[in-house]
């Protein structure tokens, strides 16, 4: 629908048409409308950056100059000094109408470049047309100069030199997993209990550091002995933490000064002048002191997030805003009535917009895997307090309402459902889904708390603080629970498990012997031989990834390190160790399982059609797979339609799925992370199912090389769930969502027509009751009709704001590739 | 004598140290309008600055 036509329609008429994006424009404040439209979208459009987006060369230049200058300093101090130099000198800006500030590039249209992470990422800059700042030639010269300095000196370059060469080659092949085993590209949890619940400003932390320095210096000047030797290094780390906290306070002060300068010299509107003065006061208060107002609380959080992103390329945004900002919201809106609900809504909406505008440079493979966004900012809402009582509040409602007004695709929400959640909150959750946002995803809170305790031994009260560490995995926000470094490379391309089991460990796509030689599948005489090969290949893939990641974590304080993050972690401030050190962390690792369900469907197809029914021989099957099913269409369709498929409540294939998961869970307990804890699996996909389409060979579920893989962690293949939504839930309910893995992503599509009105809500609620009764830990919904999506494909300009749930994240439909779009349309619309 | 930043309309000295300050400029890009600032020394050479505007 064109903008002009939409303007003439009433909100009721637009609702009837499902034109939620025009409704948002009509309902939101002028400020939110301006700020929302002001955002330069950083997510890649099907893999390419939008016109006008430029890589920021200021931060890399400032950082490198100072990093080089302090070359004789120990790692954390050297990095702290380089980052402090960035905070003191990078260009800053305040957008008109903004009440919150902070960005990690020097201009709104820039993407940050993390140049000390990996040379293989740095080299990708040369392949991106259009993102160099003008004059391009000068920028290219600068990039070459910076790349020359960092070549061989990045975190991954250093790690590659200590990795086993065979592991390194196989890992870097891109066939079995993705990511980079360093905190340069990790996701860091924030120690919200220390900072927000503890009501600490940076000056309070500096006081604690000073006390620790004093105590340690007393000891290093005292009785000689081995116990004082580690203190020398820790003293330097404490210096680094203190130095970076002071720089962060100065950085906020620069925004305060700019706000006052604008108010006193440029602004003529008295109301805006007042806002600018309030903004200045906000930046003078936080992060130096604990926040005193709701605005300051949000600003404090945003400063921490931005500075962390100046320190490392963070691919996720673990946060629980309705919980940690609630005290200041309650004070300002409900108790002291300093601001109105509408004013608070403007702040909440802008808080989301400030996160939406954040974007860093990522290599093409990462952009293809996360089409339309630059990371998975999944914010956690709802859940319980540490005593088990309902934690939902007015701010939960405000975030759910603001999401429908600003309609950003990032951040999204994961909602912690539990039996005490009120109907009022559930209706708001449903409204977001009904408005086609694709979020919140719904998480089973009691079950996931139990899961956290089961896999990682988090105590109950700590487990109850959990946030989404990335898309899916729960992680506490406590001293020993918070996770500083999620090594994204522990992400497995699981379809390779069955592919390698069939091909004796050989990868015909990358043409390399990858996995162990488990035997010639043509000679298999019963299914157990194939399953045994599958177990070996599964173990090999998990081992290779986890070995790499473990080493990356162990070496990270030396090869990278996070001074600012450390300064905001209770355990690091207390111990003087880098936050990324495994010491003091309980461990919260998981292996993300991309392209998982293909294993169960493929194994079931071979078992039924080759070994049980003997309709085909293994030789015939292997010939067909090696030919990519070419010339075997009738046989291929038999493997698609004549074999049971996951998601239909069919025990034949469901039992195989459970058998596979139990093998994985057994192995997950055997592997240990550097903290000594387990590595459970977490099946989900982001848009890895598209990225891996050209990397995974033909499979016995009838898939050809190049076809999109299944979209969800445990979602049935698109169009293959033929027995309705209850059957999908029943299949998924056969999984033990505590003991079989860390979490299991389920995508579902619902019909917007069926979900309309009160009747729609009641139907959805009944569906959710079944979901909870069957013990599933996750579900997320797309509720946009095929007609709208087809129309958006045909006329993308008119449907710029249509949002869809891709996998663990949402994206604007027009920003994802045609293949991903088609994959979403192919998903079965469930009538419930 | 060379032109210095402190002579420019865009230069705003810091209260605590007038020898240092911010170069503050208004920018209107295709999506938004904003004020940007970067730190400069009062005595920095501004003779080659394309946005210099005498106070």
Image: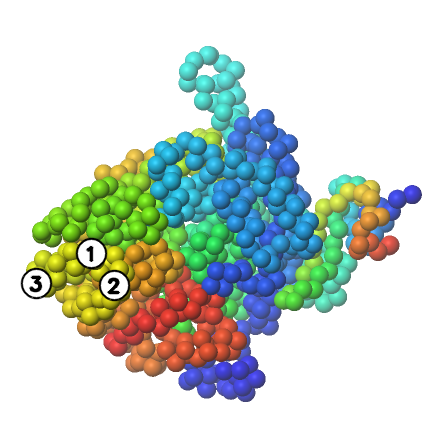
Q: Both on one chain, marks 2 and 3? A: yes
Q: Report which quarter residue A536 is drawn in.
A: top left
Q: Chain of mark 2?
A: A
Give the mark toward the camera: 2 or 3: 2
Crowding near pointer 2: few (<14 within 10 Å), some, many (20+)?
Answer: many
Give A344 or A238, whichever is nearer the viewer: A238
Q: Is residue A407 visible?
A: yes
| Secondary structure found at label 1 | helix
Q: Chain of mark 3?
A: A
Residue A740 in the image: above or below residue A428: above
Residue A22 in the image: above or below residue A676: below
Q: Which residue is mark 1?
A: A622
Q: Which residue is mark 2?
A: A629
Please give the label number shown on residue A613.
Answer: 3
Give A832 or A380, whichever is nearer the viewer: A832
Give the mark toward the camera: 1 or 3: 1
Task: Tell me the residue at 38%/40% (across/down).
Answer: A169
Disc with the residue nearer the chain's start (1 vs 3): 3
Disc with the residue nearer the chain's start (2 vs 3): 3
Total marks placed = 3
Task: Tell me the residue at 46%/83% (across/down).
Answer: A14
Between the residue at mark 1 and the residue at mark 3, the CA separation in whole angstroms equals 17 Å
């Amino acid at each position: 629908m064109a903008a002009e036509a939409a303007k003439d329609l009433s909100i009721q008429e637009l609702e009837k048409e499902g034109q939620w994006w025009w409704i948002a424009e009509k309902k939101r404040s002028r400020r939110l409308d301006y700020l929302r439209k002001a955002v330069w979208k950083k997510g890649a459009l099907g893999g390419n950056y939008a016109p006008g987006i430029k890589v920021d060369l200021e931060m890399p230049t400032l950082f490198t100059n100072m990093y080089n200058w302090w070359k004789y300093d120990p790692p954390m101090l050297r990095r702290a000094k380089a980052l402090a130099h960035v905070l003191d000198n990078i260009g800053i800006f305040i957008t008109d109408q903004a009440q919150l500030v902070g960005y990690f590039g020097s201009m709104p249209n820039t993407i940050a470049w993390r140049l000390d992470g990996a040379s293989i990422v740095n080299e990708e800059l040369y392949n991106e047309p259009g993102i160099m700042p003008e004059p391009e030639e000068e920028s290219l010269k600068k990039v070459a100069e910076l790349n020359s300095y960092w070549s061989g000196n990045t975190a991954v370059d250093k790690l590659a030199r200590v990795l086993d060469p065979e592991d390194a080659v196989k890992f870097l092949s891109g066939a079995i997993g993705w990511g980079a085993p360093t905190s340069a590209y990790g996701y860091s949890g924030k120690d919200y209990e220390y900072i927000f619940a503890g009501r600490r400003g940076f000056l309070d932390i500096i006081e604690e550091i000073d006390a620790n320095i004093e105590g340690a210096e007393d000891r290093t000047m005292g009785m000689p002995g081995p116990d004082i030797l580690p203190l020398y290094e820790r003293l330097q780390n404490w210096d680094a933490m203190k130095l970076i906290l002071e720089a962060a306070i100065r950085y906020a002060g620069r925004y305060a000064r700019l706000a006052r300068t604008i108010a006193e010299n440029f602004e003529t509107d008295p109301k805006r002048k007042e806002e600018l003065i309030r903004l200045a006061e906000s930046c003078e208060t936080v992060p130096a002191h604990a926040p005193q107002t709701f605005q300051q609380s949000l600003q404090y959080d945003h400063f921490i997030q931005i500075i962390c992103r100046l320190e490392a390329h963070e691919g996720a945004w673990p946060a629980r805003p309705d919980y940690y900002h609630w005290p200041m919201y309650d004070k300002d809106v409900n108790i002291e009535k300093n601001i109105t609900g509408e004013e608070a809504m403007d702040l909440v909406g802008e808080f989301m917009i400030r996160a939406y505008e954040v974007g860093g440079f990522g290599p093409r493979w990462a952009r293809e895997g996360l089409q339309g966004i630059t990371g998975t900012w999944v914010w956690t809402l709802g859940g319980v307090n540490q005593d088990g009582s309902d934690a939902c509040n007015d701010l939960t409602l405000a975030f759910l309402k603001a999401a429908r007004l600003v309609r950003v695709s990032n951040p999204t929400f994961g909602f912690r459902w539990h039996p005490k959640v009120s109907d009022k909150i559930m209706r708001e959750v449903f409204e977001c889904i009904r408005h086609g946002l694709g979020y919140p995803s719904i998480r089973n809170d009691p079950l996931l708390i139990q899961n956290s305790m089961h896999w990682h031994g988090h105590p109950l009260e700590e487990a109850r603080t959990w946030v989404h560490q990335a898309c899916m995995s729960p992680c506490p926000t406590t001293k020993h629970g918070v996770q500083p470094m999620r090594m994204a490379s522990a992400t497995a391309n699981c379809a390779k498990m069955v592919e390698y089991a069939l091909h004796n460990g050989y990868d015909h796509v990358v043409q390399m012997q990858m996995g162990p030689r488990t035997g010639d599948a043509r000679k298999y005489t019963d299914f157990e031989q194939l399953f045994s090969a599958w177990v070996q290949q599964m173990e090999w893939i998990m081992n290779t990834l986890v070995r790499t990641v473990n080493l990356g974590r162990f070496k990270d304080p030396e090869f990278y390190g996070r001074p600012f993050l450390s300064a905001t972690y209770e355990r690091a401030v207390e111990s003087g160790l880098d936050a990324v050190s495994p010491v003091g962390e309980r461990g919260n690792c998981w292996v993300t399982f991309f392209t998982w369900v293909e294993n169960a469907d493929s194994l079931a197809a071979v078992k039924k059609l080759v070994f049980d029914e003997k309709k085909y021989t293994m030789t015939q099957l292997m010939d067909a797979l090696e030919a990519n099913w070419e010339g075997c269409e009738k046989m291929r369709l038999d493997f698609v339609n004549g074999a049971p498929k996951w998601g239909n409540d069919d025990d034949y294939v469901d039992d195989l799925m459970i058998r596979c998961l139990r093998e994985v869970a057994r192995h997950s307990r055997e592997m240990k992370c550097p903290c000594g804890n387990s590595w459970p699996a977490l099946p989900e996909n982001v848009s890895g199912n598209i990225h891996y389409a050209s990397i995974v060979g033909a499979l016995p579920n009838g898939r050809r090389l190049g076809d999109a893989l299944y979209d969800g962690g445990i979602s049935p293949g698109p169009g293959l769930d033929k027995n309705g939504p209850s059957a999908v839930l029943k299949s998924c309910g056969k999984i033990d969502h505590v003991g079989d893995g860390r979490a299991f992503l389920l995508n579902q599509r619902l019909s917007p027509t069926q979900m309309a009105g009160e009747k729609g809500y009641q139907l959805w609620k009944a569906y959710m009751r079944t979901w909870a009764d069957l013990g599933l830990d996750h579900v997320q919904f797309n509720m946009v009709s095929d007609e709208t999506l087809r129309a958006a494909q045909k006329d993308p300009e008119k449907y710029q704001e249509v949002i869809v749930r891709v996998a663990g994240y949402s994206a604007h439909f027009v920003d994802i590739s045609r293949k991903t779009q088609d994959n979403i349309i192919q998903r079965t619309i469930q009538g419930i | 004598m060379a032109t210095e930043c402190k002579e420019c309309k865009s230069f705003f000295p810091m209260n605590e140290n007038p020898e240092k300050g911010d170069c503050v400029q208004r920018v209107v890009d295709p999506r938004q309008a904003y004020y940007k600032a970067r730190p400069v020394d009062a005595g920095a050479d501004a003779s080659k600055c394309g946005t210099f505007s005498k106070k």
